[in-house]
Image (cartoon, helix red, strand yellow):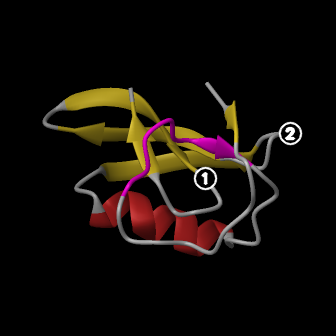
Amino acid sequence: RAAHSPSCKPPNSTPQPGAPWACATRLPEGQAKSRIEDMGFKNVSGLKKDAAGVWRGKASQGGKSMNVSVDFQGNVVGN
């Protein structure tokens, strides 16, 4: 689920409503993985940047496997 951001702003530490935002990101894969892990996810795998500029992959949290994403602002979303 990617919404359209009114503008591309630098990463921030507070997740924003509507994340993940579509916007070309310069966030390297290693930093995207670190952001996901910092949010308590484990076993991060399969990270790929989609056409909207959002990193998407798989991870686990609380024993459950789920999809995760990281947008250009560093917002991490698991579902």
The residue most toward the right is 51
Q: Answer yes or no: do the residues labelled 2 and 1 have beta carbons within 8 Å?
A: no
Report the amino acid beneath label 1: Asp
Disc 2 secondary structure class: loop
Instruction: Locate residue 62 relative to residue 10 in the image: left or right.
Output: left
Label 2 and label 1: CA atoms lie apart by: 12 Å
Q: Which residue is mark 2?
A: 51
Q: Quadrant of the C terminus?
A: top left
Disc 1 secondary structure class: loop
Q: Let me know if residue 54 is in the magenta part.
A: no
Q: Residues within 10 Å of mark 1 (few under 14, many from 20)?
A: many
Q: Earlier in the sequence, mark 2 or mark 1?
A: 2
Q: Which residue is mark 1?
A: 71
Q: Quadrant of the N terminus?
A: top right
Residue numbers of the magenta segment: 15-22
Residue 17 rendering spot, x and y as whole percentages: 43, 40
Instruction: Locate residue 45 relative to residue 72 in the image: left or right.
Output: left
Q: Is residue 12 above or below residue 77?
A: below
Q: Quadrant of residue 51?
A: top right
